[in-house]
């Protein structure tokens, strides 16, 4: 039950309503009134919990006004996990008012890697119809109200081939094998930015890693969590934990900030899932035990790609000079900098590449407004937030914008295209790949 | 006036985008950070967000004509229910109106609209080597309008004083919609003794006399050097004694903060890596100014504190200073750690006592906590006798709420008995209005008369600062 979930039961009362979170919330920053503050989100979850308000369109809309960016929770003196509270409330709303199209998307399509891949591939093939035909055939239209052409524009050209279809299940290390890692290939990288996956694998193998791409991995669960399909997210987390722990690898790596956030429990605490398993009479005791074991095994083994390259492997010493020098700036994805406090490593990679003139932009760590499906469901608001980011990128004088999150990549690429700016968006690993190949 | 008609009229006057009337949206305006607002929901009838003096005046005229209570609001970080419409009516949210109109460097002053955030103002002023010295703990979220209305101060009040010392003039919209400017309509002077000091009257008036729409603030050159002395005292009484000795040596530190044992423990529980030394009290002296005088004063304080303290450290290295200062800045949050299932509540949190009574106040609060079975954590600005008490309770348990309320009442009374005040910087609002009589005696009648003269209909922020005549 919503009311009894530990986070709802224990955290709401710790919010002292100091308002510190007003200073960092990207949504509040656009509206500037209390009804758009993170403190207000905590309050709204409380009203729902206490039955002062019942589920209504208005309440659902209010709880929808959150990017789950963790800007608030990362500075909250009481460490209130605002996004987690919002996710619980959204799940409660879904429970009260199930939506069939959401069910189709988040329970069927986005839990089955094969189905999702085929559908996106179909959209990629049918270029001119693209997302529109996909959305129609899947009933996606109801979560993208009226904004399909725009959604298509945001996503840009959908690649014809997923990363997975281009990569083997096991890729040997070049030279002596130093370590064996699993590459958690998230949906965004796999389907929308396969070139990042290719670069990731190339750089990792170059650095002496044998790379395994686990085949039956599913989505990390973040889109589900954000869209009120919490139980599905839980199932996905359990599924993934159990698969990953059996691979016999030294580390699990992802280039997606949201995937690592979920896997290492920042965004979605495995503890919550495990607690639930323990207390649930339905779940087989062995599954609970196994999941606990898996979660314990995973502790300290999940790495963001940039952290793994810089802190664990150490950057290669013989990095070649880029053919043409470029000015590069970096955008901090919220799920990396706020949820996981990872700030230096991506910059270190960029700064280690001869020929990169690294320029810090103003407000590098402010949200881009993308946040997965948020840009699609809250287009106008999302674009206002994006506009500030684009201005900042432009002012930095950069020719290349590096970032390490597929959702930010999609969103910022769109913003740059719309602004008519010829600035490329890449993952730091792609520049590293380039420099290594040239060497 | 019927609510729907009022909403219509306000929308006609301001435009729909500046009027909030949806019942769910209005609920977000039912709180500030006070404990009282956590226990109640004071939902206004309508919220407006004007962005010009004309708009404020127009709203006040409508409210005045229709006897509608008006509660001005900044960021709602106050701890007294001051910005909450406890009698219903209209909340005027001024926080979106955040223009810095002019930085007059030549005349060392700045003109701002009420919604400017304190930290943002100082960020801008830093570009000119200037600063607005009062520094509340809520700097990154509170508004200058709220600071002026509450006469806020902060860690550095001991040297730099409160907001009032810096307010040179105000534009105020009176309850009937009339606009006045205090401190001289044309004035850019810093000294000015002409006329009754209306500026001082409105500073700290907590929104009960009018709406502040423009603020002329004096700004100061930003000091270049800074250093911190930490001193650990085995006995609480030695802490205020050391403070006095520092003053007697002719030194005025920019901040003197105290953590008592409860606060030391809370900080160590919250951030074990800070690892504050054990003692009955820790003092942090901050000195600022030009680097050579900072060095001299820091070393002198170190020498003086060593007479009574068991351990003293003088730090000027930025990282070390940040670590030491962090011990103080996290305590407000750390307080909750003394009870994993609890939360601190902002109540009885701001008494101020004579310097010579600080140790007595801290001891008495500790025993009051024991008497009522409530855990308390104490810290504060000892340099000016301002004690912050954090009761830590489970705010969702009615019996604990009851106990906390009784404790808080005794803390407020204790402050008055010791020759102090129920509030040193946070203000009175709704939560301390009942102590006005106790604290001020017949002077309350004069306050009521002033209020009546400016707000004959009693529509400005009713129920705050003191009780209305006869209640
Ligand atoms: C964590 C924390 C730390 C704090 N630390 C300090 C501290 O160190 N020192 C300190 O002094 N305070 C402190 N405070 C209290 C509070 O932040 C300050 O009093 C602050 O100045 C209030 O500003 P605000 O914009 O939030 O005002 P609000 O809370 O919105 O309003 C405060 C009062 O001012 C009135 N008001 C607001 N704007 C106007 C206006 N334009 N015209 C007329 N009346 C107006 C309101 O009606 C209300 O009575 C702290 C609060 C918190 C939560
Ligand atoms: S969520 Fe945190 S930062 Fe925001 S009001 Fe509550 S305690 Fe303060
Ligand atoms: S998670 Fe981000 S968008 Fe949501 S309330 Fe917090 S700061 Fe605002």
Image (cartoon, coloured by chain):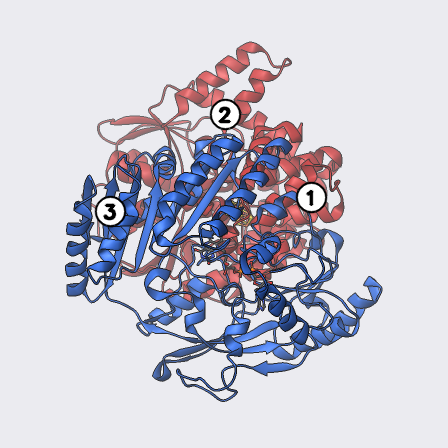
In-front residue for pair B244/B4: B244
Is the CB of mark 3 within 8 Å of ligand 1?
no
Image height check: is B282 above or below A359?
A: above
Question: The chain shown in blue is which?
Answer: B
Q: Report in which chain the residue with disc 2 lies.
A: A
Classify 10 Å Cα crowding around label 2: few (below 14), some (14-19), many (20 and above): few
Label 2 and label 1 in one chain: yes
- Which mark lies nearer to you, 2 or 1? 2
Secondary element under disc 1, as helix, strand or loop, is helix
> Of the residues tagged 3 and 2, which is closer to the observer?
3
Of discs 1 and 3, which sits in the foreground? Answer: 3
Could you tell me which quadrant the N terminus of chain B lies in? bottom right
| Tag 2–tag 1 contact (CB < 8 Å) | no
- Residue drawn at x 55%, y 53% as measured from the top left: A156
Compared with A295, B58 (above or below) is below
SS of the residue at dot 2?
helix
User: Which mark, residue A140?
Assistant: 1
Residue A344 location, x and y as percent?
A: 31, 47
- Residue at image location 46% in from the left, 56% down from the top: B424
Q: Is residue B410 left or right of residue B256?
A: right
- The image shows residue B35 at horizontal and vertical percentages of 58, 45
Left-right relation of A229 to B259: right
The reply to whether callout 3 and callout 2 are in contact (CB within 8 Å) is no
């Amino acid at each position: 039950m919503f009311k009894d979930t530990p986070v709802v039961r224990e955290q709401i009362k710790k919010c002292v309503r100091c308002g510190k979170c007003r200073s960092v919330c990207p949504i509040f920053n656009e509206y500037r009134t209390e009804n758009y503050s993170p403190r207000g989100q905590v309050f709204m979850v409380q009203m729902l919990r206490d039955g002062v308000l019942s589920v209504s369109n208005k309440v659902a809309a209010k709880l929808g006004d959150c990017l789950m960016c963790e800007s608030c929770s990362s500075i909250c003196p009481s460490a209130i996990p605002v996004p987690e509270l919002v996710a619980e409330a959204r799940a409660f709303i879904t429970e009260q008012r199930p939506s069939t199209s959401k069910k189709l998307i988040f329970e069927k399509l986005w839990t089955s890697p094969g189905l999702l891949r085929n559908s996106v591939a179909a959209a990629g093939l049918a270029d001119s119809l693209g997302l529109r035909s996909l959305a129609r055939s899947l009933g996606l239209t109801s979560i993208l109200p009226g904004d399909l052409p725009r959604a298509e524009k945001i996503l840009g050209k959908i690649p014809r081939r997923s990363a997975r279809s281009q990569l083997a299940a096991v890729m040997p290390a070049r030279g002596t094998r130093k370590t064996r890692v699993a590459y958690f290939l998230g949906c965004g990288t796999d389907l929308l930015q396969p070139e990042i996956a290719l670069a990731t694998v190339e750089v990792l193998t170059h650095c002496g890693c044998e790379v395994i791409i686990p085949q039956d991995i599913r989505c990390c669960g973040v889109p589900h969590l954000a869209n009120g399909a919490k139980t599905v997210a839980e199932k996905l987390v359990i599924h993934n934990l159990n698969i990953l722990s059996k691979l016999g690898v030294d580390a699990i790596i992802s280039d997606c900030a949201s995937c690592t956030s979920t896997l290492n429990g920042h965004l979605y605490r495995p503890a919550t899932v495990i607690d639930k398993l323990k207390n649930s009479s339905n779940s087989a005791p062995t599954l609970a035990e196994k999941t606990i074991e898996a979660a314990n095994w995973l502790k300290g083994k999940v790495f963001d790609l940039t952290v793994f390259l810089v802190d664990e492997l150490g950057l290669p010493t013989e990095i070649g000079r880029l053919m043409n020098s470029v000015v590069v700036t970096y955008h901090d994805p919220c799920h990396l900098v706020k949820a996981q406090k990872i700030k230096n490593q991506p910059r270190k990679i960029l700064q280690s590449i001869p020929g990169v003139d690294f320029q810090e932009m103003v407000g590098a760590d402010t949200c881009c407004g993308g946040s997965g499906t948020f840009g699609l469901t809250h287009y106008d608001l999302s674009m206002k937030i994006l506009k500030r980011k684009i201005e900042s990128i432009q002012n930095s004088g950069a020719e290349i914008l590096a970032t390490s999150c597929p959702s930010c990549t999609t969103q910022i690429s769109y913003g740059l295209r719309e602004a008519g700016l010829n600035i490329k968006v890449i993952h730091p690993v792609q520049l590293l790949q380039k420099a290594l190949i040239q060497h | 006036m019927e609510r729907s008609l009022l909403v219509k009229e306000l929308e006609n006057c301001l435009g729909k985008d500046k009027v909030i009337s949806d019942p769910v949206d209005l609920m977000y305006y039912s709180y500030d950070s006070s404990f009282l607002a956590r226990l109640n929901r004071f939902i206004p009838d309508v919220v407006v967000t004007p962005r010009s003096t004309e708009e404020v005046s127009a709203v006040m005229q409508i409210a005045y004509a229709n006897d509608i209570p008006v509660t001005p609001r900044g960021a709602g970080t106050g701890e007294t229910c001051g910005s909450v419409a406890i009698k219903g009516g209209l909340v005027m949210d001024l926080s979106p109106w955040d223009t810095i109109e002019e930085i007059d460097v030549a005349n060392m002053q700045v003109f701002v609209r009420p919604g400017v955030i304190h930290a943002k103002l100082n960020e801008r002023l830093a570009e000119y080597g200037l600063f607005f010295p009062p520094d509340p703990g809520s700097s990154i979220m509170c508004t200058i309008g709220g600071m002026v209305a509450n006469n806020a101060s902060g860690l550095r009040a001991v040297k730099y004083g409160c907001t009032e010392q810096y307010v040179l003039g105000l534009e105020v919209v009176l309850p009937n919609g009339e606009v006045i400017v205090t401190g001289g309509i044309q004035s850019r002077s810093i000294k000015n003794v002409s006329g009754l000091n209306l500026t001082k009257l409105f500073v700290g008036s907590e929104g009960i006399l009018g709406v502040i729409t423009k603020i002329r603030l004096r700004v100061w050159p930003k000091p270049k050097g800074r250093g911190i002395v930490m001193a650990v005292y085995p006995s609480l009484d030695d802490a205020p004694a050391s403070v006095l000795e520092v003053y007697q040596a002719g030194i005025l530190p920019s901040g003197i903060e105290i953590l008592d044992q409860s606060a030391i423990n809370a900080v160590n529980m919250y951030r074990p890596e800070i690892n504050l030394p054990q003692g009955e009290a820790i003092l942090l002296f901050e000195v600022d100014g030009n680097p050579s005088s900072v060095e001299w004063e820091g070393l002198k304080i170190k020498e003086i504190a060593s007479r009574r303290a068991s351990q003293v450290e003088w730090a000027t290295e930025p990282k070390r200073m940040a670590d030491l200062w962090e011990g103080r800045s996290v305590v407000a949050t750390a307080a909750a750690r003394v009870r994993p299932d609890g939360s601190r509540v902002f109540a009885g949190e701001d008494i101020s006592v004579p310097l010579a009574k600080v140790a007595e106040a801290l001891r008495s609060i500790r025993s009051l906590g024991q008497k009522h079975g409530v855990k308390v954590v104490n810290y504060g600005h000892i340099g000016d006798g301002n004690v912050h008490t954090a009761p830590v309770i489970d705010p969702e348990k009615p019996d604990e709420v009851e106990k906390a309320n009784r404790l808080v009442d005794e803390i407020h009374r204790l402050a008055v008995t010791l020759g102090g005040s129920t509030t040193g910087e946070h203000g009175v609002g709704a939560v301390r209005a009942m102590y006005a009589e106790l604290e001020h005696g017949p002077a309350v009648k004069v306050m009521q008369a002033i209020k009546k003269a400016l707000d004959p209909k009693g529509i400005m922020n009713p129920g705050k600062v003191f009780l209305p005549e006869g209640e």
